[in-house]
């Protein structure tokens, strides 16, 4: 299991969400990240999800 970090921003730079979660694979992390964004209605906000090694998994600007 690897650790992933999901962050969501407003256009002015304020953080709306900053949380971490674990997933077995990058694909699973992408699905979990998408679900969290959908639940909080943040899909169209600027967001990123990265692995603990810094690899970008999800990004929206």
Image (cartoon, rainbow, N blue to C red):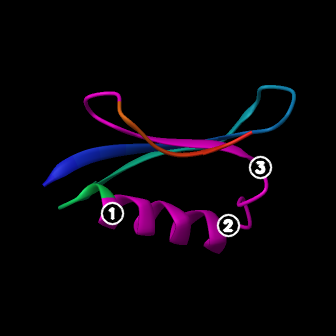
> What residue does disc 3 label?
45
Please give the range of residues in magenta: 27-54
Write the residue at 61% across / 63% down. Answer: 37
Assess whether residue 9 is covered by the magenta stretch. Answer: no
Mark in the foreground, 1 or 3: 1
Decide: few, some or many residues near mark 3? Use Cα within 10 Å; few <14, some 14-19, many ≥20: some
Q: Which mark is residue 9?
A: none
Distance from label 3 to label 2 (Cα)? 10 Å
In what quadrant of the picture does the N terminus appear?
bottom left
Dot 2 falls on a residue whose secondary structure is loop
Mark in the foreground, 3 or 2: 3
Q: Earlier in the sequence, mark 3 or mark 2?
A: 2
Q: Position of residue 21 (x, y in %)?
A: 33, 54
Instruction: Say whether marks 1 and 3 touch (CB < 8 Å).
Output: no
Decide: few, some or many residues near mark 2? Use Cα within 10 Å; few <14, some 14-19, many ≥20: few
Decide: few, some or many residues near mark 1? Use Cα within 10 Å; few <14, some 14-19, many ≥20: few
Q: Tell me: residue 12, above or below residue 4.
A: above
Instruction: Say whether marks 1 and 2 touch (CB < 8 Å).
Output: no
In what quadrant of the picture does the C terminus appear?
top right
Write the residue at 74% across / 67% down. Answer: 41
Within the image, what quadrant is residue 47 found in?
top right
Q: Position of residue 13 (x, y in %)?
A: 78, 26
Q: Is residue 2 left or right of residue 11?
A: left
Assess whether residue 41 is covered by the magenta stretch. Answer: yes
> What residue does disc 2 label?
40
Q: Position of residue 23 (x, y in %)?
A: 24, 60
Report the number of numbered marks. 3
Distance from label 1 to label 3 (Cα)? 21 Å
> What residue does disc 1 label?
27
Q: Earlier in the sequence, mark 1 or mark 2?
A: 1
Within the image, what quadrant is residue 55 found in?
top left
């Amino acid at each position: 299991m690897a650790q992933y970090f999901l962050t969501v921003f407003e256009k002015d730079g304020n953080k709306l969400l900053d949380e971490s979660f674990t997933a077995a694979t990058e694909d699973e992390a992408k699905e979990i990240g998408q679900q969290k964004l959908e639940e909080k209605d943040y899909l169209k906000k600027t967001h990123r999800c990265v692995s603990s090694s810094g690899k970008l998994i999800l990004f929206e600007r």
